[in-house]
């Protein structure tokens, strides 16, 4: 398979795979696609460890790193050393009480250890994502991706100076145009069915609009889980596909066992776009947590990054408890079709096989 | 192009077009696709007139009729002669006051004529849709479609006895299985991006799931507006595509001028799934009307068919007024790409041309 995206990176397959797990990233790249490591949850030191591991296990194949540099968030003008403190002060006590009460109602025990101060904000801000970018650019990465809008122009220039291509996720054609204006090389057109931060327009409707709006290669994201969907994404004009939720259940993934079981059992109706994770709309597993924030007594969510700061300890407490009904995480509608645990290599193979079958079927329909 | 769907009906193209306008229906069928007339707004007498006109203008090509027989609604067990009266009595005065107040705030003048008593319920119930079915089956239709779930088994049998195939719209694989169990011949797998009543799962995610769940031909619906999307729908495993919003702006459509202008100007973010039209979630043009029902002072919507009975006079008043900001109607996300008025024949031609181009591109990607 050959597109401008495979040519740009020397790939065998136009399949991009986002994962927070280094094993998945390396396995996808070794199969001829491109693994992209989500850096968000790692401190710069941890990220250094992960990337060194990938370098040693990727057999010289290209891979990428995904960071979150939101174009807008509360505290963007605060000095880095006072950022966390000032943001903490902006969280209303009523919101803290709502979270405490929600956890109490579900009998979630308190934490026995304090949060790592380096993880209170994660990579949710420009200030906390930049050190991740610096680490990433010290490694032989092929692609730097920004998950929330156009990356800062100086970050694009820095990447380009190191020979690294830059991609960004877009949920409207207007976003895509802005991203290309700051120098983005690849646009990931992500439909509303995708997991994590996502817009309103579906992949089917969005991809052709983005393809028509920009000159750079476009990847189709959102709802890509089998070879038919790869073919559909390319039919829409994309030059590759971007996958994510598909990799939560592969053998190599370090997804917690409880989450993995829930994904395997979920239907495509078990996700919802919610601000309850970060303050910006993200598709999450729908459960008592997402519903609590929609209920009549909800105080409403806070803007990014306050909402995550408000709930991060709560999510840790839930993760370590038996309160499975509150444990939510980013997940796309495609989780409705993942019902077995397979090695990454086997999933990559089935994507290609399914694509070839879809093409044979389309060719037969067209010739008749 | 040949699929089981084209074979079933003797079509040249696996393109189905839903429209409330007879001219569009006949034009699509004459082009080798299948036009399907939405019967909802017509009294049985009016429907007779429309179908007689189509019979005279369709050159013997196959066409279909779409009715709404919801599997569940308030008053399903009321006697037909007391249905309207009892339902009217179930509408809370507070809801009527909310609608009156909303219209007053937007300076919408009262109606000068009373509503046609035959149009208070439209075809929103089994009782009011059955006479439409009887009229439809007196004409040489090829397809009877139910827009809201599995049609009653006796209606399926009646259609089959006349040699008429039956289709139904499904928004989950479970719905599709139930429909095939009652004898449906074709399943329309409709994604959340579609206009009108629609579910939560996107076309990209839904279609392969439905294809895998049933043995009958599946049509891909939701987000189909150009040839790339036709190719994508077929790549997903569908044997045809079902289009709707695309036809609101064609030359032949009797869409009111104001609505047509708003569709041409809309982006794909200008629609929303809302219960404010009928009580069941339907994708509508997003505006002051849909927002009013979501606002803090909204009394909430009523179940089908009470909501439509509550608002039908209001929608007539708005339609005849200058209150353009309140005029909503069913519309899919694809309205974001319709920006010109073209003859139906030209749109059909461009769908085929775009499909062929997409196939050539896919073939080149695959061979390389």
Image: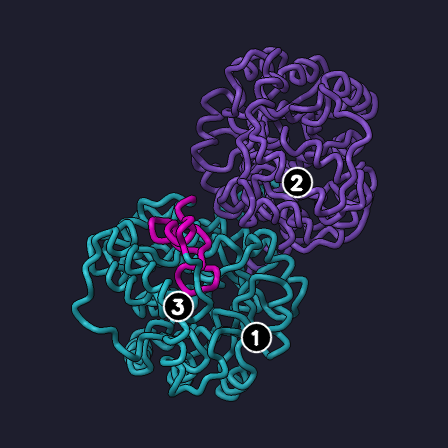
Chain colours: A purple, B cyan
Label 2, label 1: how many angstroms apart (C-alpha)? 37 Å
Q: Residue at x 31, y 57 (%)?
A: B250
Q: Which of these two is toward me, A69 or B46?
A: A69
Q: Which label sits in the foreground, 2 or 1? A: 2
Do discs 2 and 3 belong to a common subunit? no
Q: Chain of mark 3?
A: B
Left or right for A252, reference A156: right
- Vertical order, A66 against B227 (above or below): above
Residue B34 or A250: which is nearer the viewer? A250
- Give the left or right position of residue B109, taking residue A315 as reference: left
Q: Quadrant of residue B195?
A: bottom left
* Mark 1 lies on residue: B185
Q: Residues within 10 Å of mark 3 (few under 14, many from 20)?
A: few
In the image, B37 versus B351, the foreground residue is: B37
Name the mark on residue B92.
3
Can residue A355 be seen at all in this image of the molecule? no
Q: Position of residue B363 (x, y in %)?
A: 58, 45
When the figure is inspected, residue B65 is found, relative to residue A366, above or below; the finding is below
Residue A192: say if magenta.
no
The CA span between labels 2 and 3 is: 40 Å
Q: Which residue is mark 2?
A: A330
Q: Magenta stretch: residue B272 in it?
A: yes
């Amino acid at each position: 398979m050959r597109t401008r995206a495979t040519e740009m990176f020397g790939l065998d397959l136009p399949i991009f795979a986002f994962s927070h797990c280094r094993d998945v990233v390396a396995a996808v790249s070794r199969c001829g696609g491109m693994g992209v490591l989500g850096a968000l949850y790692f401190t710069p030191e941890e990220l250094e460890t992960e990337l060194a591991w990938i370098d040693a296990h990727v057999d010289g194949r290209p891979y990428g790193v995904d960071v979150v540099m939101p174009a807008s968030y509360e505290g963007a003008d605060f000095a880095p050393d006072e950022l966390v403190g000032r943001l903490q002060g902006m969280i209303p006590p009523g919101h803290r009480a709502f979270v405490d009460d929600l956890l109490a109602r579900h009998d979630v025990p308190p934490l026995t250890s304090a949060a790592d101060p380096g993880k209170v904000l994660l990579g949710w801000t420009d200030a906390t994502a930049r050190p991740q970018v610096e680490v990433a650019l010290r490694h032989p990465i092929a692609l730097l991706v920004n998950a929330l809008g156009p990356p800062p122009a100086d970050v694009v220039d820095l990447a380009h100076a190191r020979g690294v291509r830059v991609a960004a996720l877009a949920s409207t054609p207007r976003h895509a145009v802005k991203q290309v204006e700051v120098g983005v090389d690849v646009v990931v057109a992500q439909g509303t069915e995708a997991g994590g931060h996502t817009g309103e327009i579906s992949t089917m409707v969005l991809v052709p609009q983005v393809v028509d709006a920009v000159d750079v290669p476009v990847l189709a994201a959102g709802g890509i889980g089998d070879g038919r969907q790869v073919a559909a994404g390319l039919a829409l004009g994309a030059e590759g596909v971007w996958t994510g939720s598909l990799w939560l259940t592969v053998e190599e993934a370090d997804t917690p066992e409880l989450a993995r079981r829930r994904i395997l059992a979920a239907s495509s109706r078990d996700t919802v776009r919610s601000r309850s994770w970060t303050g910006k709309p993200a598709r999450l597993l729908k459960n008592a947590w997402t519903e609590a924030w929609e209920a009549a007594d909800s105080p409403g969510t806070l803007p990014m990054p306050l909402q995550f700061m408000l709930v991060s300890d709560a999510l840790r407490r839930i993760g370590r408890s038996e309160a499975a009904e509150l444990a939510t995480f980013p997940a796309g509608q495609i989780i409705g079709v993942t019902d077995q645990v397979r090695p990454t290599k086997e999933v990559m193979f089935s994507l290609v096989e399914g694509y070839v079958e879809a093409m044979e079927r389309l060719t037969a329909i067209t010739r008749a």
